[in-house]
Image: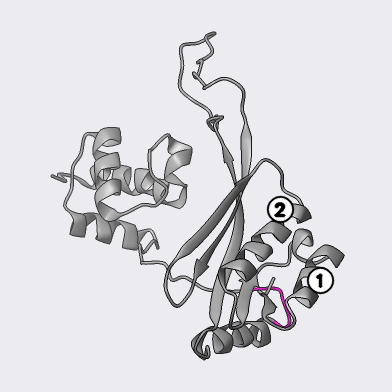
Amino acid sequence: MLRSASQIRLLAARAAAVRRRPRSLGLPFSLWTLQRLVDYLAEQTGIRIALETLRQVLKGEGIVLSRPQHKISSPDPEYQVKKKAVEDTRDHLKPGDVCYYAYEFNLSWLPTLKALWSPVGQQVMIPTPGQPRKHYGLGAVNYPTGETVVLFKRHKRRREVAELLHAWVDKHPTGTIYVAWDNADTHQDDEIEAIVRGAAGRLVLLYLPT
């Protein structure tokens, strides 16, 4: 419990840690909460205080912990137009039509290495399963049904993207196939356009905003 003005000043000074990212202080989380800050201050000062007391200490320093809000922003001047086009398409499908959201990702057996605490002069060795083989994944989710389609390839090329489009056309022999994806170079070239033309209007590509 707090017993003196000097303890309050000490806590106020240490509470300024809330202005720093927790991980920069060696803590295993990215965002502060009152409880986390109480625990941190108890370790640093030996003084454990109630949550409301800490709230008042922070308020005295001009700091208020509040819940952040997610905000969608984009530099694309046509953001609203493209967004509406995708949403109107997916929400007004005709019987037999499908709408996929597509994306790509990399899969590697090589663990990601970051800074670790270790004895001075010693290097931590991380065991790995041999050579760091990488695979390229092309995935998509059927918006109305939730069904997923994923292809794993050894390369990230237009040819593999074309294979995914062919797979959709073969999977849905009737109806229109709408594909919403980003503006990657592999999504916009002559080979892709040839597949769209070959589908005779049954394959429609919708490009997401930047």
Q: Is residue 159 shown above or below 125?
A: below
Q: Is residue 207 shown above or below 113?
A: below
Quarter of the image for residue 193 reads bottom right
Q: Which residue is mark 1?
A: 193
- Within 10 Å of disc 2 (Cα), the crowding (few <14, some 14-19, many 20+) is some
* Residue 104: x %, y % from top left: 62, 55
Q: Is residue 113 magenta?
A: no
Q: Determine the secondary structure under disc 2.
A: helix
Give the colour scheme shown. one colour
Tag count in the figure?
A: 2
Image point (24%, 50%), residue name: 35
Residue stretch in magenta = 74-78
Quarter of the image for residue 140 reads bottom right
Q: CA distance from mark 2 to mark 1?
A: 14 Å
Q: Which residue is mark 2?
A: 160
Image point (42%, 67%), residue name: 68
**Nearest to the observer: residue 44 or residue 202:** 202
Q: Upstream in the sequence, badge 2 or badge 1? A: 2
In the shown orientation, is residue 27 left or right of residue 126?
Answer: left
Location of the N terminus (image quadrant): top left
**Nearest to the observer: residue 141 or residue 111:** 141
Image point (42%, 34%), residue name: 26
Q: Which mark is residue 179?
A: none
Image point (52%, 88%), residue name: 93
Q: Main secondary structure of the magenta part?
A: loop
Q: Is residue 76 magenta?
A: yes
Label 1 sits on what residue type? Answer: Glu
In the shown orientation, is residue 47 left or right of residue 57?
Answer: left
In the shown orientation, is residue 202 left or right of residue 157?
Answer: left
Label 2 sits on what residue type? Answer: Glu
